[in-house]
Each structure stands twice: as C-alpha cells, then as structure tokens.
Image (cartoon, rainbow, N blue to C red):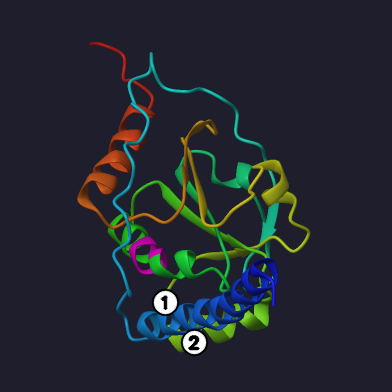
Amino acid sequence: MSEQNQSVETNSSQLKWLIPIGLLIVFLGGIFYSRGRAPFAVKQLPELAPLDQENRMIQPAPDFEVTDLSGKKFKLGDFKGKAVLINFWSTTCPACLMELKSLESLSQQLTGKPFALLAVTDNSRDEIRQFLDETGLKLPVYFDPGNDAHRKYQVMYLPASFVIDPQGNLVDQIPGAADWGNPQVITYFQKLIEISQPKKPSP
C-alpha cells in the first residue's frame, strides 16, 4: 500500500471519530445546562461602546415585526422609550443556551425600569414552550419565523446581541455568548436609560 493511500485511510479514520466526539460534547453540554451548570465558563461581556453622547454610535435601528408566545405581534418601534437588548438565539445553539440564565438575571434585575429584553428565535412555539417548561427559564421570547429580523441585523452566527437606546438607535452589537448578569452590564443599561432621559430645563 502506498504512503498516499495510508495517509488517506488515516485521515478518514480520524474524521470518523471527530463527528461522534463533537456530538458527545454538545450532548454533555445540554446535560450540564439542564442541571443549571455550564460545562465551561461563559466569557465576560466585551467592553461596551462608550455612552457619552459625543462618541456614541448613532444609527437608527432597523425595525422588524415578531410575535410572542401568545401570537401577539410586536414591532421594535413599540418599545421606543426603553433601552432594548435584542438577543438572537436558538435551542440548537450550545453557546446560546449557556447565556440564557444570565439574560434572565438581567431582565429580572431591571424589572420596573424602562428596559426590554427581546429573545428572538426562529424555533417553533411548541419547541420553545417545551424548552421553557423543561428548564424553568422565564424569558420574553419572540418568534421570527420568516427570519426578517435576522436578515435586517445580518445575523450570520448565534448568539448575537444588539443594544438599542430609548430613542431607537443602535448603539452596540455583541457577537457570541456573554455574562449578562454581571453588575457592570446592569450599570451600563442603567446609564443608557439615564442619559436618554429628557433633560430638565434649568430653573
């Protein structure tokens, strides 16, 4: 047998094992997640864009329409006046699953504030209902069955997150999973809300 044929057989043998090993990693990740533990640490949130008015990126956020679990329709414009975090995710994305608990924490910590979390997915309602029942997560999930929102935000990989200020401007975008429950993130959104409030006239 030639060295070339031996090399091809060796590579084929290696590839044969890569697929089941990869599936095993995903399976174990799902088990760990369902038990409330992540198999490895979610990276800390990258430094968010400065929030001072002079340096902050000002770009109108593309509007889109999604539906909630009950089938009610919402547009991004309906949340104007609130700081919004749009998180694109899927139940088949291991990295997405790892950050959902911290997204839930972020939403809970900002309860009562002008803030909205839009957890946007292209999963079916039945899949999401079953997922939420099994995990016990309380997330404001919105459905994008036609992938209109995914296209407008040019989402190529999951998870992907976008920060919208109360005026409806896109001010930051964060690729990949992150620790959304971090106190610095809470402070960031509180500041975003604060600087977006109308300034009171001087007496």
Q: Label 1, on which residue? A: 137
Left or right of 147 on screen, residue 46: left
Instruction: Establish if 112 lies above or below 125.
Output: above
- Tell me the quarter of the picture where residue 191 sits: top left
Instruction: Establish if 163 lies above or below 94.
Output: above
Looking at the image, which residue is at 38% across and 17% down? 55
156 in the magenta segment = no
Q: CA distance from mark 2 to mark 1?
A: 8 Å
The residue closer to the viewer here, 97 or 142, is 97
Classify 10 Å Cα crowding around label 1: few (below 14), some (14-19), many (20 and above). Answer: few
The residue closer to the viewer here, 20 or 69, is 20
Q: Quadrant of the C terminus?
A: top left
The residue closer to the viewer here, 192 or 120, is 120
Percent across and percent down for residue 44 are 29, 51
Where residue 56 is drawn, which disc sits there? none
The part of the chain drawn in magenta is 99-103
Q: Quadrant of the N terminus?
A: bottom right
- Tell me the quarter of the picture where residue 194 sits: top left
- Looking at the rendered structure, the kind of residue marked 1 is Leu
Percent across and percent down for residue 105 are 31, 64
Q: Label 2, on which residue? A: 133
Looking at the image, which residue is at 50% across and 80% down? 21
- Looking at the rendered structure, the kind of residue marked 2 is Asp
Left or right of 202 on screen, residue 116: right
Left or right of 99 on screen, residue 169: right
- Kindly state the secondary structure of the residue where label 2 is placed: helix
The residue closer to the viewer here, 138 or 37, is 37
Image marks 2 and 1: residues in contact by CB distance under 8 Å: no
Percent across and percent down for residue 63 are 67, 40
